[in-house]
Amino acid sequence: MKKINVHIIFIAVLFVLSLFFLKNILHKSVMLNNVHYINDLTFLSYNTKESIKKNELPLWTPYFYSGHPLIAIPENYMFDLNFLLIYLFKDIYFAMNFSAIFYFFLAGLGMYILINAIIDNKKGAFISAIIYMFNGYMQSFIMHGHLNILEGYALVPFVFFFVYKAIKSKDWVFYGILAGIFFALQILAGSIILFFYTALIVGAYFLFNLISRNFKKVLIKSVFVGLLAVSVTLGLSAIKLLPVLEFTKMSSRSDKVSYVEFVGEPINLENILKILVTHVNFPGMSAAIGIIALILVLYGLVNYRKKVVVFSLIIMIFSISFASGTFVADVMYKVPGFDKQRHVERSLVLFVFAASILAAYGFASLSEKLKKYKLFAKYEISFFALVIFLILLQLLFLQTLPLPSKIIKPEDIKLLDYISKDASIFRTMNIALREVIGTVGYNYYAQKGISEVKGGGGIWVNDYVTFIAIAQNTLSSKILGILNVKYVISKRELEETDLKLVDIFEECKDCPFSEPYGPYLYKNQNFLPRYYTVPNSVLIVGDNSMVKQAVYNLMLQNLEPKNTVLVEGIKINDYNADFLKRFDIILLLKDSVDSEGISKLREYALQGGVIVPDILNNQNSISNEAIHSIFSKLNGSYTEMKINDYSNNKVVVDLNGQKGWLVASERFAHFSGWKASINGKILNIFKANNAITALYLEGEKGKLVFEYKPNSYRKGKLVSILTITIIIIYLVYYFLPNMGGSNQA
C-alpha cells in the first residue's frame, strides 16, 4: 500500500505541474495561442463535431480547397482524446484545451512508468518525467505545433515501455500487442512525424539488443515481437493509413521532398550549449535539459555496463549528428518515410528521450554513492527536493508559460457576420493572404457553413493549387464563378469591374491573424450556383497536360461558363458514339484520335456535331479567331438545381426530369472515392473546367446522390475491425485464467 501511495503522489504532482504549465488555457473563453490550434485544429474539430451529429466520420470537408479529403491528411487526427471529448460534450474548445493538458501530463506519466520499469527508482523516474515534460524541445517545438505533435510525443515512452517489456518478459505476446496499439494510436492521432522517430528508436533498440551471448534466442524473440507489433500497428491504423497512402500518391507529397526541404534549418554546433543545456533567449530549435539534468546525464554514464545506458548514449550522439545535418542526415534521407519528412532539427526528440533516461540513471547512481555518508541519509529527501527545484527553476519557472488567446466567435467578425446572412450556397476567396496556401480564416467560415476555395496545411493537390493561383492572379470573375465564388475578401481596394464592392468592414490588428476580417468585401457579378445545368457542352480530348492548357486558354478567352461546360477526356476511342452525341463540340488535341475513332467522329458529325479542328475535311489546325467564332454561337443560360441535403460526405440534389449536362462546382470527379447515383443507379462523373465535376442527366426524376466512400477507407475499416476482434479474443483468453484465480506468470 505504501508503494502505491508513493506512485500516486508522484503522478499527482506531475498532473499539478501540467495544470500549472498550461494554467493560461484553463478558462473556458480562451485557447492556446498557437496558430495550429486556432486555425487547423479548430477547423478539424468543427468538421468532426458536425459529422458526429450524422453518426459518421469527416472523410471529406467541403469547407476549404473547394472540398478536400480530411481524415486522409496525415497530420489530422481520426481517433484520439479530442475526438472522444467532442463526441461526449460537443464543445470543440473544451476538447482541445483538455486534450492539450492531458497529453502533456501523459508525456510525463509515460516516462515515469518507463524509467520505473527499467531501474526501479521512483525518484529517478520522477526526475526523468519532468525533464521529458519541460525540456527545450517541448518549449520550442511541441507546444508551438499541432496537437498531433504533442500526442505523438506523449506516446513515445509508452511504445518503448511495452517493447522493452516484450523483450524482457515471458508475456511477449501481450506486451507486443500493447506496443502495436500505442504505435497505432500515434498514426490515428495524426502524429506521423513522431511515429517515424518512435519507430527509429524502437528499431535501433531491437538491433542493439542483439549484442548478446544468446544472440540466436534474442534474435528469434526480437523478430517475433517486431512482427507482432508491426502487424497490430498496421491492422489497427489501416482505417486511416490506407486513405492516407491513397491521397498521398495524388498529392504534393507523392514524391519525396527535396533535400533542401528535408534538411530545413539544421542546428549549428556553435550553439550547442544553448541547444542542449539552456535555451533562455534562444530563438531556434532547442532540446535544452538544463545544467542539473546535464550533470545527471553525464553521471549516468558511470553505468556504461548497462545496455540501456550505452543505447541511450548512442541515440543522443545520433540525434545531434542527424539534427546538425551531417552525413547521418544524408543517410536518413534515403530511408523510406524519412525522405518525406522536413527539418532534420526535429530529430532532437531522440536526444531528449535518451537524455531523460540517462538523467534517471545518473540520479540513481549519485544517490547510491551519497548514501555512504550519514549526513546524506538524514537529508536525502531534501537533496531530492533541491534537485527537482533546480531542474524546474531552469526548465519551468524561468520560462514563459504557453500563452492564451481569446476564442473568437464567427459572429465577432463583422465581414463574416454579414455574408453569413446570405442564404444561398456559395464559396469565398480570401486574397488578403497573398499566398495561395495558408491560414485565411476558413476555421471561422466553416462554422457558418461557408466554404473557401483556398486552404492550408502541408498537403494539397498541385493541379488544383495551380487553378487557384491562376484565379488569384487574374481575378477573373468567370473563373471565380466556376468555383462558386460569390464573395472576394481583400486587404486592399480592387479595380476589377466584375467584382462589386459591398462594404469596408472593421479590421482586427490584434487578432492571431487578420485575413478573415478583410476589410474589403467584393461580390462576384458572374457568380454561378453550386449545382446547375447548362445547354451547351464541349468535349476536349488529348494528352492530359495539353487538355488542361486548352481549358485554361478557353476559360480566359472564349468560354462562357453560364451556358457551357468543358468536359475533359483523353482519347475518342474511350467513348462510344452515343456518348459523343451528348456534346455540341468536340475539340481534338494531339494523339486524341486514330483510324478507329474516325468512324465515330463521322457518325457524330452526321448528327450535327462540330469537330474542332475538322479533321474529316483535312483541317489539322484552327485559329483563335475561328474558335472564338464557334464558341460565340453557344447561347442560353444555366438552370440552378435544388440541393436537398449537404453534409461533409454526402450531397443530395433533387431531380425533376432535367436532361443534359449537370455542372457541380465540386472536385468530386478528381477523387475516385466520390460516386454519383440516381435512385441507386451509378452514373459516370467527369472532370470539367480543370477543377470541377460534370455528369449527364437522362431526364430522371428523384434524388441525385453524391457520396464519398473511398475504397481505401472501406478496406481499412474492415482490416481494423478484424484486428480489434482478434485482439479482444486474445485478451479474453489472456485474462480469463487470472480472473479465475490462476497464478499465471
Image: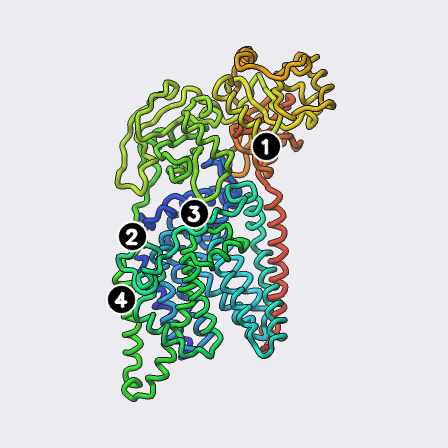
Q: Nearer the viewer, mark 2 or mark 3?
A: 2
Q: Tell me the residue at 62%/65% (across/down).
A: 730
- Label 4: how many residues lie within 10 Å, few (<14), some (14-19) or many (20+)? few
Q: Position of residue 72 (x, y in %)?
A: 53, 45
Element assignment for label 4: helix
Q: Nearer the viewer, mark 1 or mark 4?
A: 4
Marks 1 and 4 sit apart, C-alpha to C-alpha, by 61 Å
Element assignment for label 2: loop
Q: What amino acid is found at the position of numbered circle 3 in the picture?
A: Lys
Which is more N-terminal, label 3 or label 2? 3
Which is more N-terminal, label 4 or label 3? 3
Of all residues shown, which one is farthest toward the front? Answer: 327
Q: Tell me the residue at 50%/57% (across/down).
A: 332
Q: What amino acid is found at the position of numbered circle 2 in the picture?
A: Leu
Q: What amino acid is found at the position of numbered circle 4 in the picture?
A: Leu
Label 1 belongs to which residue?
Answer: 705
Label 4 belongs to which residue?
Answer: 393
